[in-house]
Image (cartoon, rainbow, N blue to C red):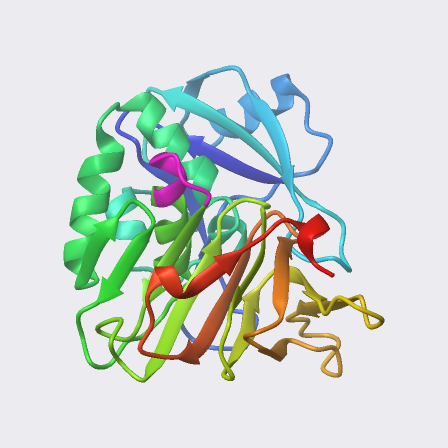
Amino acid sequence: MFVLTTDQFGRILIENVAARSGSSENLVALPNIEKNFLQAELENWMKSHSISQVSETIRFSLLTTTDQPKTEYISCSVENVGTPKSPFEWVSVENLWQKNIDDSIASAMNQIIGQVEKINPGSLEKLEQLFVKDFDLNKVNPRVFFAKSETVEVTEALISFLGAFSVGNGQQTARLCMHHSQSQVIQEMLMIHAVPISTGPLRQNNNSSVSYHMMRGALEITLHHGGTVGNIVHHVERRADQPSSPSSIRVPARVFRTIRTVTDSAVFIEVQSGPFSDSDTEWCAIEDIR
């Protein structure tokens, strides 16, 4: 069970752990404790790391992959913090996105940002402004961003924070356009389903295609062919331990499709032909597909 702890300044208690790949660079993770810790045991654990005055704890779980159990978390806010012993340390959120974060932080970023905003109202807006500047992005609206640079590098931190900021602004998804304008021939978008959603049926009524390349989580993509073919369901998910499982799919743009998030979040690259306008997308009800 991972412990999500924030202090009165909105800093996060993290643990430096060795990268699983054998890299010399450490990962930043949330502290990991026994799953069945009681409140008193948690407070004793906190005191051993120079922390006192623990708020009421909240437990939550996240499904990050379909072939593993949910990841368990316990969150709380604290006061009167001291200097914890290595490998633990307090990290401000704006420093967190420059670090090599692991899955325990990446998957729980919605909760991290939500907890920081609750402690220090107004933090969300300030952090997002700084984030957009640091990553050289252009914010079009609460869920759409464009990369300004010709070369775009995507990190787990970039993905996680974009999704968390969108959720904090009342959205369910975030989109990072890695092309510079809707008029370009190739439209390459980093799509973040920050919460489980279902969108569609939708299509672009042309002879091009749309491809989806999974980076995190799982999607169920249903192609509504109508007629005697009917619906065909495809499951796409990146699984490190199952290299033969489909993690990418290319579908005809003219066929209506519904995209459903199977895990608690999903991240994928969507590529299609341009020029493109949101008005090119047609929507319909499932019962209207014949």
Q: Residue at x 75, y 83 (%)?
A: 244
Q: Please check the rendered image and state whether residue 168 is part of the magenta-colored stretch, yes or no.
A: yes
Bounds of the magenta span?
166-172
Residue 222 spot, x, y in % from top left: 70, 63
Q: Is residue 150 visible?
A: yes
Q: Is residue 58 left or right of residue 135?
A: right
Going by the picture, which residue comes out furthest to the right? 228
Between 224 and 251, the one nearer to me in the picture:
224
Residue 229 spot, x, y in % from top left: 82, 72
Q: Is residue 244 left or right of residue 24?
A: right
Q: Please check the rendered image and state whether residue 257 is part of the magenta-colored stretch, yes or no.
A: no
| Number of numbered labels in the structure image | 0
Q: In the rendered view, would you say 132 is above or below 221? A: above
Quarter of the image where the C terminus is located:
bottom right
Between 28 and 254, the one nearer to me in the picture:
254
Q: Residue at x 24, y 64 (%)?
A: 146
Residue 237 figure quarter: bottom right
Q: Residue at x 54, y 36 (%)?
A: 3
Residue 260 spot, x, y in % from top left: 64, 54
Quarter of the image where the N terminus is located:
top right
Q: In the rendered view, would you say 23 is above or below 166? A: below
Q: In the rendered view, would you say 231 is above or below 117? A: below
Residue 273 spot, x, y in % from top left: 40, 81
Q: In the rendered view, would you say 203 is above or below 251? A: above
Q: Residue at x 22, y 42 (%)?
A: 127
Residue 57 figure quarter: top right
Between 169 and 65, the one nearer to me in the picture:
169
